[in-house]
Each structure stands twice: as structure tokens, then as C-alpha cells.
Amino acid sequence: MDQMCLHCDAKFWLCEKNQNSSLSSPRFAMCCAGGKVHLPPVLDPPPYLLDLYTLSHSDAISFRKNIRAYNGILACSSFGTNIDESFQGQGVSNFKIHGQIYHHIGTLLPDEGQNPVFAQLYIYDTNHENSNRLCVIHNLNAEILQSLQYMLDTYNPYI
């Protein structure tokens, strides 16, 4: 990514330029519609999260190795759609969506005899929310999970 939108500073590769713009003066519109859309700047990540992304100590390496699992276990909903399986193949992980995208939120309380999942983990039995999470995905580091939960409680107004 060595090109930038003149209006919003979004980063692009040159091949993503508008077809009607030149190589010497490329323009990009998929970010802000040529300056028509104004979004607030992206905030810097909390220090703990930035450290997990950038440092090379064992916790950071473990976090990056399991980043999808941490993201999934701390999510308040799950992604749902009809996936076109014919598109999947070898190489980079990707998928093609057929139809509408939706989010499963579920009920506020788990069904009788079921463990809490997703948003229920934030509401039901909050004293044990991280131990409940570790029952869903077993190979996560409990200290990293606790620190991520503390970070979300501190920085995310919706948690």
C-alpha cells in the first residue's frame, strides 16, 4: 500500500485507483467517495492491545497465534450468512456470501443446562465470565483473556 487518498488519507495499492484516473495522478473513491464522506479518525489501539500486536514476548506471540479465537470468544454476537462453498479452495482463507449477512445475538440467558455464549457471557454469571469463556475454547491463555477483558471494560463503552 503505497498510495493515499487525497481526501481521507486511506491507503491503497496503485491497482485500486479509479479506472478514469491516471497513473501519475491516481484517485481513489472506494474509501470516502472522493471526499463526500467524512469519518472521524481511527483511534489508536489501547496500549495493551498494541503491545500484543507489535512485541515479541511469549504472550504476544501466543495472542497472535490465537487471535481469531480471542476475537471470537470476546464477541457479543456471531456472524451468520449463507456461504457459497463452491468458492472455497486452496490458499488464502476467503469465502463468498450468498444472500444477506446477519448477526446471531441469542437470548439474554442460556437455556436450561447450557453454558453461556456470546453476549450471555457479559450478562450471566459475570463473576465467572472468563472461566466460562475458557470452557468454550480451551487452549487460550487465561491471563491474556483476563487482560483483554479488563481492556474492553476500560475502553469500550458498549461492553
Image: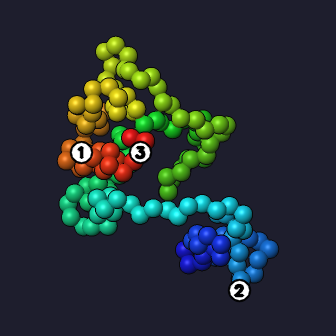
Q: Residue at coordinates 49% horizontally, 52% vertically from top-left? A: 93
In the rendered image, the vertical position of residue 45 relative to residue 27, given as above or below: above
Q: Which residue carries the number 2 mark?
A: 24
**Number of residues whose C-alpha sits closer than 10 Å to that of mark 3, classed few (under 14), some (14–19) or many (20 or more):** few
The residue carrying pointer 1 sits among few (fewer than 14), some (14 to 19) or many (20 or more) residues within 10 Å by Cα, namely some
In percent of width and height, residue 26 lies at 70, 78
Mark nearest the camera among 2 and 1 is 1
Circle 2 residues within 10 Å: few <14, some 14–19, many ≥20:
few
Residue drawn at point x = 46 percent, y = 26 percent = 106
Which residue is pictured at 49% across the width and 62% down the height? 42
User: In the image as oriented, which residue stretches furthest toward the bottom?
Assistant: 24
Q: Label 2 to label 3, Cα distance in Å? A: 44 Å
| Mark 1: secondary structure | helix
Q: Image quadrant of residue 113?
A: top left
- Farthest-out residue, top: 112
- Of 65 and 128, the residue lying toward us: 128
Residue 29 visible at all:
no
Q: Earlier in the sequence, mark 1 or mark 3?
A: 1
Q: Alpha carbon of mark 1 to alpha carbon of mark 3: how far?
A: 18 Å
CB within 8 Å, label 1 to label 3: no
Nearest the camera: 141 or 139? 141
Query: In the image, what residue type sits under mark 2?
Result: Ser
Residue 157, disc: 3
Quadrant (top left/top right/bottom left/bottom right) for the N terminus = bottom right
Q: Which residue is mark 1?
A: 146
Q: In the rendered image, which quarter is residue 31 located in?
A: bottom right
Query: In the rendered structure, are the residues bearing label 2 and label 1 in contact, judged by CB atoms less than 8 Å apart?
Result: no
List x then y, in percent, for residue 32: 67, 63
Between 77 and 97, the residue placed more toward the observer is: 77
Which tag is nearer the camera, tag 1 or tag 3?
3
Query: Helix, strand, or loop for circle 3?
Result: loop
Please state which amino acid type lies under the numbered disc 3. Pro
